[in-house]
Image (cartoon, rainbow, N blue to C red):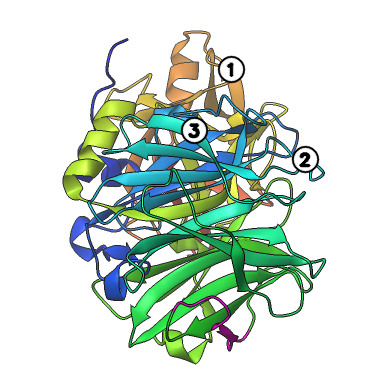
Amino acid sequence: MTTPRRPSRRHVLGMAAAVPLALTADLALGAGPAGAATGPAFVMAYFTESPDGLGTDYGLHLAVSLDGLEWTPLNQNKPVATPTQGAGGLRDPFVLRKQDGTFAVLATDLKGTDWSYNSQYIHVWDSADLRSLTGYRRLKLHGMTTHSWAPEAFWDAARGQYAIVYSSVNASGHNVLMVNYTTDFRTVSAPQVFFDPGYDVIDGSFALGVGGTNYMYFKDSSKQTLVGARSATLAPGSWQRFSTPVAHGGTEAPILVKSSSSNTWYLWGDTYTPNGVFYAWQTTDLASGTWTPVDQRRYTQPVNSKHGSIAPLTGTQYDNLLAHWGAPAWNRLKSYNHPDRYVRHADFAGRIDPYPFDPYTDAQWKLVPGLADASGVSFQSVNYPGRYLRHYSYALRLDPNDGTSAFVQDATFHKVPGLADSTWTSFRSHNHPTRYIRHSGYALRIDPVSTATDRADATFRIGY
């Protein structure tokens, strides 16, 4: 198979219309020593679900990012590995950067949403660089007749071992966080209760050694919120809840991430639905336990992603992953003033709709050289590749390319700096150069632009 052309780090940012490279904030997982940065790039692991199941896959998916906020799915957003044992699928994959710089990938042994399937095992892979995953196995954590959900791991320096923390039902009758210790992710210590606040909890995420304190965020299942606890020792039973809960509807799967260029911490969460939406909060004082929402313009999750984890990469590892797996051959366009909505076609009409939706491929476009002018751009539909987005009586619709002069001109646009934000993009009509693509009542059309509202309606982010 031909290796896809490797986009450079600057090329990927340009395609995604992200913040200029000089302005990006390097982030690092707080799970490293004192939350220190170990690289200028990041990898996210996740599985996928979509509203009607068209984008659902319970294999291991990977995406990369230079700023930890805008993500480039690898392998066309297809799995890079799929379990062959147990349930034959996974949920909740977690990437751990180990002490030696290599990686371990852990995941729940569960395919789909059959919550009655109780596996005592988790899936495990080893990897030097995430270009190949080796040593696949299932690791048994306990002998109870219950599950082992959402495993995460960290290095416990005092013990000289890795802690594997996961959710399981103990004698208490509700979900608690359990822990096993290991040096090799092949044999583990006996399980013990790690955190039991007296109510149902799952999904632990960690930031270690921050100002001499260790932090953990988890899902309080009784209230569907993300909550923080802290400990001075990392010892089982030593964690004390302290934070103000955060949520956007029912929220789970917390991910703690720190900026290495500032004192900003980010907390990601995944809405608890079969087709979740990621939201993010930020704080400059992790000890305060209070968070403010991050503007959705600043981050974009991989399409259909669920319950992710984030690990730091070196710049070389980032480049090598893109060279090996390839960036998507398609893009999505996010609305500037409705950042929860994406450009799509529905019944062949152009519009912006809230993510997620099916068919999710309605929102995927190949940005090809302009049909009437190669210096411009035309929007070729991914799921209807013979059709292009064009204007007709100023309304945008998806029509077959009939090769006429009128069609190719109607389907050609020119990229310009975003009219509302120059780091985003606007699209000027080729044959009506005073008009730009904008949304009005969520329908897409080309109109003259004069007001601030017009400029916001006509501004988009090219991403994935």
Q: Which residue is nearer to you in this view: 463 or 44?
A: 44
The residue at the point 63 percent across, 66 percent down is 177
Mark 1: amino acid? Tyr
Q: In the displayed structure, would residue 320 be above or below residue 293?
A: above
> Where is residue 182 shown, x and y percent of the image?
42, 55
Q: Nearer the N terminus, badge 1 or badge 2?
A: 2
The residue at the point 24 percent across, 23 percent down is 5
> Where is residue 64 shown, x and y percent of the image?
35, 45
The residue at the point 72 percent across, 32 percent down is 53
Mark 3: amino acid? Arg
Q: In the displayed structure, would residue 256 be above or below residue 463?
A: below
* Disc number placed over residue 221 in the picture, else none: none
Q: Label 3 belongs to which residue? A: 137
Mark 2 burial class by Cα count in 10 Å: few <14, some 14-19, many 20+: some
Q: Nearer the N terminus, badge 3 or badge 1?
A: 3
Mark 3–mark 2 CB contact (< 8 Å): no
Q: For numbered disc 2, what is the local secondary structure?
A: loop
Bounds of the magenta segment: 234-244
Which-is-in-front pick, marks 3 and 1?
3
Q: In the displayed structure, would residue 10 be above or below residue 177?
A: above
Which-is-in-front pick, marks 1 and 2?
2
Q: Quadrant of residue 369?
A: top left
Q: Label 1 belongs to which residue? A: 384
Mark 2: amino acid? Tyr
Q: Is residue 216 magenta?
A: no
Q: Label 2 belongs to which residue? A: 117
Q: Label 3, label 1: how many angstroms apart (C-alpha)?
A: 40 Å
Q: How many marks?
A: 3
Q: Main secondary structure of the magenta part?
A: loop
Residue 232 visible here: yes
